[in-house]
Image: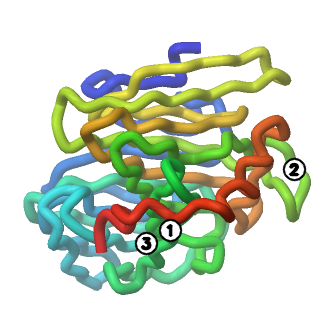
Amino acid sequence: MSELLLRAGGWEQVTPESAGWRYLHFGVRTAPFSASTGGQEIAVVVLGGRCRVEAGGESWQLGGRAHVFDGMPWAVYLPRDTAYAVEGDGEVAICGASCESRRDPVLIRPEDVEIEVRGAGNATRQINHIVKPEFPAERLLVVEVFTPSGNWSSYPPHKHDEDRPPGEVVLEETYYFRTPEPEAFAVQRLYSPRHGLDLTETVRDGDLMLVPYGYHTTAAAHGYDLYYLNALAGDHRSMAAADDPGLAWIRGAWAKLEPDPRVPLVR
C-alpha cells in the first residue's frame, strides 16, 4: 500500500480520480499562477510568503509568515465555478472538495483561526482550525497541526471511515508534512484490521499521506517540531472520529498530566 505515501518531488496534486475516493483534492503551488475551482470549493492556505488572490472582481492580500513555523495562517475560501489568480511569491496549499452548491468567498485571517491545545504530556499538540465544521462550506474541512519534537500527535489512533453519526462520520483525508530542516522526520502509522492494512512509514518535509480509511497516528522525532496540514472532505459537517478501542483509555489518563508547556508553538 505504498501508494498511500507520496514522496516530496514525486507528486503535484491529488484528485478523487488519482486517490480512488469521492471528493477530496489537494495540491501545493507557488505564485504566480491562475486557475479555476471548477466543481470544487477550495481553501487557498498560505504556507509561506505573501500573495494576493483575485477572483470575481474581488482581491484579498494574504500572508505574513515566512514559513509554516513562523506564525498563524492566512487563507481564503473560494466557491466552485470561480476563476482566480494568485500573485506574489507565496507558497500555497490548495485544499478542495467536489461540491454541488456555490457559496460566497470568505477571507480567513490569523485572528479568525481558532487555536486548540489538545492532549497532555508527550501527546500534546496544537490544532489550528482554519475551515471548521461551523464554517459555511459544503464538504471541505481544513486544520493545521503543530507537534513539538518528541511528541505524539493524532493520538490515540482514530479513524473516520464508517457512517455512524454523531460518533463517527466518513471523511477522506490528506496529511501534508513540513519540517524545519531537511534531516528532520516523523513516523506515521495507518492501520485497518477490516481492510488488512498496517502501514508504518518515515515521513519527511513535503511528503503527503493519503488516509482513505483506517486508524492513524503520528510521532515527531526528537529534536525537531513537526507541522502537518490536514484537508478533509465528507458528506457531514463534522470531524467525528472513533478511537482505536484498545487505546481509547489513554484519554482518561490525560487528566493526571499537564499539557506540554511548549504548546502553543505558534500564536
Q: Quadrant of residue 86?
A: bottom left
Between circles 2 and 1, the one closer to the viewer is 1
Residue found at x 19% / y 79% = 61
Find disc 3 in the rendering and name its residue.
77
SS assignment at label 2 = loop
Mark 3, Cα crowd under 10 Å, few <14 / some 14-19 / many 20+, is many
SS assignment at label 3 = strand
Distance (Cα) linking label 3 and label 2? 27 Å
241 to 57, vertically: above or below: above
Between circles 3 and 2, the one closer to the viewer is 2
| Horizontal and vertical percent position of residue 245 | 84, 40
Q: Quadrant of residue 178?
A: top left
- Which of pointers 2 and 1 lies earlier in the amino acid sequence? 1
Residue found at x 67% / y 17% = 198
Q: Is residue 163 left or right of residue 75?
A: right
SS assignment at label 1 = strand
Mark 1, Cα crowd under 10 Å, few <14 / some 14-19 / many 20+, is some
Q: Amino acid at mark 1?
A: Val
The quarter in which the C terminus is drawn is bottom left
Distance (Cα) linking label 2 and label 1? 27 Å
Q: Tell me the tag on residue 117.
A: 1
Q: Is residue 229 left or right of residue 254?
A: left
Say whether residue 145 is visible. Answer: yes
The quarter in which the N terminus is drawn is top right
Find disc 2 in the rendering and name its residue.
163
- Tags 2 and 1 touching, CB below 8 Å: no
| Horizontal and vertical percent position of residue 89 | 9, 58
Q: Amino acid at mark 2?
A: Asp
| Horizontal and vertical percent position of residue 76 | 36, 73
Q: Amino acid at mark 3?
A: Tyr
| Horizontal and vertical percent position of residue 100 | 66, 64
85 to 155, vertically: above or below: below
